[in-house]
Image (spheres, helix red, strand yellow):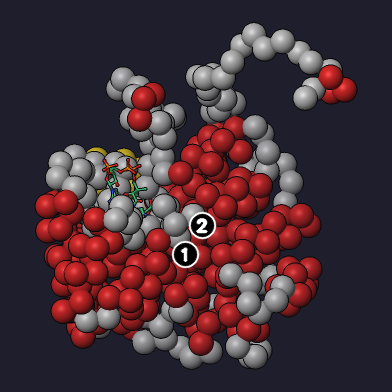
Amino acid sequence: PAAKPNKGGLEGIVAATTAISKVDGTAGRLVYRGYDIHDLARTCSFEEVAHLLWFGHLPNQKELSELHERFTAERSLPENVLQTIRELPSTTEPMDVLRTAVSTWGAVSISGKPTIEQAIAVTARFPLILAAFNRLRNGKEILESRSELGHAANYLYLLTGEVPKDEHVQGLNSYLVLLADHGMNASTFTARIVASTESDIVSSLVAALGALKGPLHGGAPSKVQDMLRTIGTVENAEPWLREAITHGGRLMGFGHRVYKTADPRAEELREMARVADPDDFKLSRHVEETALALLDELKPGRRLYTNVEYYSAALMKAVGLSGDLFTPTFAVSRCAGWTAHILEQVSNNRLIRPEAEYTGPLNETFVPLADRS
Ligand code: CMC
């Protein structure tokens, strides 16, 4: 496709080839290695999807059991990582804790060219880091993982100390499946850039975590929750949203660079959020419908829809996660996609090094420091 440099933000520019996932923004379709996201979301475990992203095919029962064993073998944190988590103030944002702890882990455990073993090891540890910090900041003991539990269930168990309800496990598992990969999004591109310099896997992931954190990318869901809390009632929705849009405000959970129609992940999450907490859903749905009508009226032609973050907030709240765990839980899922992309990048690497169109002056006359006014 032709580049559109005037719009900035690399819109429409193809930055890599990939066989991992395809986002069709016109049809509203997301595919992981040929499989439609709707087919994967309700029926597959996160581990099945991670296997699909890493190895290129859905696992049979034996392969899935092997992956589960490899995950469980990696479910512990070295003492230096635990020490880092203990030393961070309890007010630290969990996303910052995750980034720092992953970096600490990498400092002692990782070097060399990225491998699938490292991808599994780091993906297994993301939930452990978050749960350990969450327990400590609530004055509770860090728990040991339970080998019989899958990735989603073990994460919830480590957070709460209770074997989670089936509906919570299913809700979180579907969320993890839906968010695991998404084409050349900002954090995945970041991970690939770092990998392309022949750096290590943890450096790529730390950079990706930094990119994911921003509110225009993965930082949106807690802000969706803040917005819904501020709106508070169905009656307040129309005046609040009209005021926000009229004054140039960005509605969190709306709009997408690629989707110019409904985001298929948002469709899945909407239905799950409706089932998970019908009362909460009423306000979310009303705000969504009102906002879409107002965006159509006040920003005609922009083709703005609800994105994946909008109902992520409602679903994660329903499964018991606090607002500041929403974005790092996105990272728990996306770690599978990031690592698949890092491995794909290094398997056929060429340094990613674009150019910039220089817009500054070219022929200034140099003046020594002492002579400058
Ligand atoms: N609320 C109000 N107006 C919006 C919104 C929004 N959420 N999103 C885009 N617009 C308007 C924007 O003001 C602009 O209007 P105008 O032509 O008058 O200047 C027009 O639509 C195009 O916006 P843009 O910024 O050029 O579009 P983009 O492709 O760069 O932005 C986006 C994509 C996701 C950054 C943006 O839609 C946004 O800021 N959304 C809110 C934050 C959010 O929900 N982020 C999560 C993204 S999805 C998950 C993920 O990627 O991690």
Residue at 47 percent across and 64 percent down: it is 327
Q: Which amino acid does label 1 sit on?
A: Thr
Residue 94: x %, y % from top left: 58, 70
Identify the residue position indicated by label 2 in the image. Answer: 213
Residue at 40 percent across and 61 percent down: it is 220
Question: How many circles with numbers are drawn on the protein?
Answer: 2
> For the residue labelled by badge 2, is the local secondary structure a helix, a strand or a loop?
helix
Pick the residue in front: 65 or 177: 177
Tag 2 near tag 1, CB within 8 Å: yes
Along the horizontal axis of the image, is 108 left or right of 113? right
Residue 310: x %, y % from top left: 30, 64
Q: Kindly indicate the quadrant of the structure image that contains residue 265.
A: bottom left
Residue 152: x %, y % from top left: 44, 73
Q: Height in image: 153 above or below 138?
A: above
Q: Which amino acid does label 2 sit on?
A: Lys
Disc on res. 327: 1
Residue at 72 percent across and 10 percent down: it is 365
In what quadrant of the picture does the N terminus appear?
top left
Q: Kindly indicate the quadrant of the structure image that contains residue 42.
A: bottom left
Q: Height in image: 182 above or below 103?
A: above
